[in-house]
Structures are given as C-alpha cells and as structure tokens.
Image: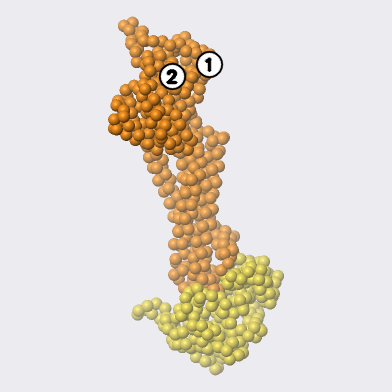
Amino acid sequence: MRKSFALQLSLRQIWSRANSTVVRLVSVLSMAGIAIGVASLVILQAFMGGFTEAIAQGLSRINPPLHVFAPGGETMDDFDLGAVQAVAGSVEGITSVVGIVERPAIVSGAPGTVSGAVVRGAGDNDSVILGRDLALELGVGPGDEIRIASAAGAEISGTGRVMVDTIAALTVDSVGDFGLAEYNGSLVQVPLETARGIFRMGSGLTAAGGYVSPGTDPVRAAEELDARLYADYSGGGWSTYMSCLPFLAFHGNLFRALGLERTAMTIVLAMITVVALLNLSSALSMIAMEHRRDTGVLRAMGLRPWDVFTVSVLRGLILGGTGALGGLVFSLAAVEAVNRFFPVRLDGEVYWIDVLPGVFPAGAALVVTLATVMVCVAVAALSSFQPLKSSPSEALRYE
Amino acid sequence: MSNTTVLDARDLWCSYGTGETAISVIRGASLKVSRGEVVAVTGPSGSGKSTLLHALGLLDRPEGGTVTVCGRNGWSMGGSARAALRNRSIGFVFQFHHLLEEFTLLENVAMPCLISGMGAKEARERAERLLERVGLSHRMSHFPSRVSGGEGQRTALARALVMEPDMVLADEPTGNLDGGNSNQVQDLMMELAAEGGRSFVMATHSRELASAAHRRLRLESGVLLEDCDGNDT
C-alpha cells in the first residue's frame, strides 16, 4: 500500500464529515487532553526550572562559585590564600582565587536610619556598592555617606545606647541590584582592605573564593580542588585542611527541596497525561469500531494485516502527535506571554526574587513530547489487535 | 469462455460455533470455474451462500478443503501473499455497496489500485475509465451518501473490476435494488463478464440474474448441487 494512501485513509477516518459527530468530538477531546497534559508538564518545568535557575543565578552573581574555608570557621590569612592559589593553579578550569571578608555589621545612612547589614570585601572589588533596598531604607544614594560598625563588637549600654567598637564612614559609589531580595536588602560591598579595617582583621580572611572559566562545572572543579587541598594537607605539605565546596552547596537544602517539589508536581501532572492517553485509547477503539466494516472491505480488496496495523498506528500518531505538538506550541506561547506581558509578581522577602521567570525547557519539552507520541503510537498499536485478529468476513458481517 | 480454470474449490467444509452448538453450513462443497464463466449460486436465506463466497474469496478459512485461485492454493500461503492474491485476482461485490463513506466514488474505485501500490495517476485514470463504463462519469466527485443504491452498486462493480481481476465474487449484487436498478446492474455485469473474459460467481435469490448465468448451482443443506431446472429460491 502506498504510504500517502495510508495517511489519507487515517486522516479521513478521523476527520471526515462522513464520520459520526461523536467520533469527531471524541477525537478532538482526546487531542485536547493530550495537549493539556503536555502543556502542563512543560509549563511546570519552565517555571519551576526558571525559579530555581533565578535563585541559583542570584546567588552566583555576587558569590564566587567555589568557596575555600578553614576548619571550624577559623579565619584564614594572606599566606593561606597564597597556598590555595598555588594549588588551584593546577586545577583545570579555575581562573582565579581571591580573598573574602564577610561579617555582619550595623549601617546607618540618613539621620535617624539604621539597619543590620552584611559587609563583604572581596579581592576583586574596589568600590562601595549598596544593595538597592538597603539604600532605600537608609535614604542614601551614590555620593552619600554611610557609617558602618562591626556588629561583633557592639554592646548595649545601661541607658540603652548601642556601643560599637569602630565606626567607618564610607561614601557610596553606587547602588546595585544583586539579583536576590535578600542581598538587595542587606548587602554592602566594600574593598577588601576596607572590610578588614572595619572588622580589625589585619591580614585575615573569612574565606577564599574561586572563579571558574565559562563551561566549567563548579561542582567538579570544587571536588578536584578539595581533593588536592586534602592531599596537600595529608601529605604534610600544609598544617591546616582547608576544604572547598561549590557555593551553591551552602544552599543545598533549598535546591533539594525545590527539586523534590518539582518531581512531585511532575508526577501529579504526568497523571493528567496518563488520563489523556486513556482517553485517546478509547477514542482510537471507537474509531476502529466505527470503521470495522470498512476494514473488512479494505481487506477484501487486498489490504494486508500489516497495512491495517499501519493505518491504526497512523491514527494514533495523528491524534497523539497533533495533541502533543499543540501542547508544545501552547506551552512555548504561554511561557513567552507570561515573561513578556503577564509577569508573575512575587514577594521578594519570601521568595528572594521579585518576578517569576519562565525558562522554556527545550530538552525536557522534547522528551515529554516524544515520550507522549511514543506512548500514543503504542496505544494505537494495541488498539489494532482486535481488527487484526478478526477475519475479514467477520468484519463484513458486522453491521 | 475458455478451458482455463480460474477457481478450483474442493471439498469445502465450513461451520459456525463449536462443540455441540456447532452448525455445519457448508458440507463438502466442490466447485470449478473456468475463465469467462458466469456461475450463479442459489439457495434459501441462511443456506450458506455468503459463507461459501467468503471461503472462495479467501476471506474466511474453511475447516476443510482447498481453494485454488489461478493455480495457487489460497490457504497454504501467508496472510500478506493471500491479501496480494485477493487484490490482483479477486473482485468483490457485496449486497450493500459497502463504499467507504469518507471517499468520493472516484477514490473508492481507485482504492484497490492504491492498495496494490500503483501510482495515484494511473489508479485515477483506471477508476475514471471504469466509472465512465458504468455510466457514472458525472458522479465521480460525489460521496456515497449522495448517490442512489443503484449508483452505489454500479460503483462497487467498478471497484471490483478496477484491478482487472480473474474473477468477481458477487454476494446478492442486486438483492438490495429495485427492479429497474436490478436489471441495470445485471446487464452491466453480464456485459463486463463478456467483455473482459472475466469469471463471475454470484450468490443470488434473483431468478433473472440466475437465469442469465452460464451455470447455476443450488446450495441445499450445505451441499452444492447442479441446478438443472433453474428453480427459483
């Protein structure tokens, strides 16, 4: 049988006006069900993935992807940093290692304003940058003066006044969006030496931060650097075991929770697709029953059993494929529409980000679509067994 | 009519059901049909005429016996080879035209050609020729629901002949038609049989159709007998 004829036969058996309204309605509904199932799965992946990615990007934006720290939270110093830099130089993908000082502090700006903050000095920063929301709270902008005091040495006097050890007056160079509401509301970036001065750390560091080249997996780089640091320590080359972790590992529980939620929701939505496939199965059976006599006539004309199977599978492919593709296109359009025209606003205090971003998951979408189409074909193949088992004359007697 | 045997069925046994409830419908029927011969099979309703035709047309496997079409034993070959033999050598006309409602008359007639793998253009040309021959050139683009019973049956006849088969099996081809249409289809069948040297085996209740055949057989209690008297059923 010519393939074009098989396709034509399948299409007409589904869509022709000669078919009963019920068959056409059931066909449309089964396709819509599959489209909804596929779209739900893809949209879920787009927004859950987008949320997770936005959080990860926000965290990575101002934090080096690798963190090296001394055991028990002890401070490091420039000598330790030099040692780490020497070891890191032999790890493929690590481009630089810088010293970091990060401590809680009290910041005041315009008269009467005061706020808790985190002061961070990193080796690669030479200006004073205030988080967007913190600047708003302190009533300051670029060029204004802020005063920073270490929270570690703060004491409350008998009269209720806060007594601090050192107060540093700094001029704000710029106000920045650090990507996460948490950072925008609390972070003050200063030069490393300034931070050391505020916290009276001398040549001390709270950690070292490593940067990697684009395309390098930070987890792999962290593991390799950690293994080399440990080897250096256990081999007697160094007295302290300074360990390395990828920065996102500090938020591992958050990402694990997000991943679990994503998996659970994927399973729930996959059930919708399963229900849609069951609906497709009944639609295909109905179409096969409706055309049972026609199948007998076609077999009398010489249609081979294999051709009957092909036509049946094509019917499943047409319904399932159209539904899955429809769902795919709809999900792509929905993600774009939400991103461009209907942004989902979030409370940054709760969710860390202000807008929920949708990132169309091309790989996952392809997998979902192909898997759905494959299951549709399998369902169609199963529905073809009955017409294949019965003899042509049995189908012809069926009226 | 030539001496070449197109159909040779020997000792066919067909029954429905199993065990004690089994009903034997055909009991040892044998039949030879020569090229160009028109054979009518008569018998009362429920006597097994359709069952016999289905067995002869390789649509239903008999419990016993052999069916040889153009020298090939139809039940000793695989399903695909049997389907190909049906496609090339056997045309079917049923009591109801059984045209596919989703296709036009032209597409219905071209269908056996497309099933055989023939090109669409050639299939279309053949179908057009045959529809013209049965007087339906003005109805080619119409759907079966828009034509009369007689026109539908003439279309079914064209479809049965489009592959130029060696024989046509017709099951009550005029059984569902009024007098005028019945005569028209009957005349057409006899003309086409004469033109193409094609064999016809017809199961019929119609005295007129049976009397037009070269040979008449009567199916009685599952046994196929020569009907020398031309009795109507």
The subunit carrying tag 2 is A
Instruction: Please give the label number shown on residue A142.
Output: 1
**Chain drawn in orange:** A
Q: Which amino acid does label 2 sit on?
A: Leu
Q: Which residue is drawn at 49% across and 83% down?
A: B73
Q: Which of A144 and B121 is in front in this view?
A: A144
Q: Which residue occupies the extreme bottom position in the image?
A: B228
On screen, residue B206 versus residue A90, left or right, reads right
Q: What residue type is labelled 1?
A: Pro
Question: Residue B1's x, y, as percent?
Answer: 61, 90
Quarter residue A242 falls in:
top left
Quarter residue B207 falls in:
bottom right
Kindly identify which residue carries mark 2.
Answer: A192
Q: Which of A306 and A300 is in front in this view?
A: A306
On screen, residue B65 versus residue B134, left or right, reads left
Q: Which residue is drawn at 35% across and 80% down?
A: B20
Q: Which of B30 and A90 is in front in this view?
A: A90
Question: Residue A316's x, y, as percent?
Answer: 50, 58
Closest to the camera, between mark 1 and mark 2, is 2
| Chain B shade in the render | yellow
**Circles 1 and 2: CB distance less than 8 Å?**
no
Question: Residue A216's x, y, as percent?
Answer: 45, 37
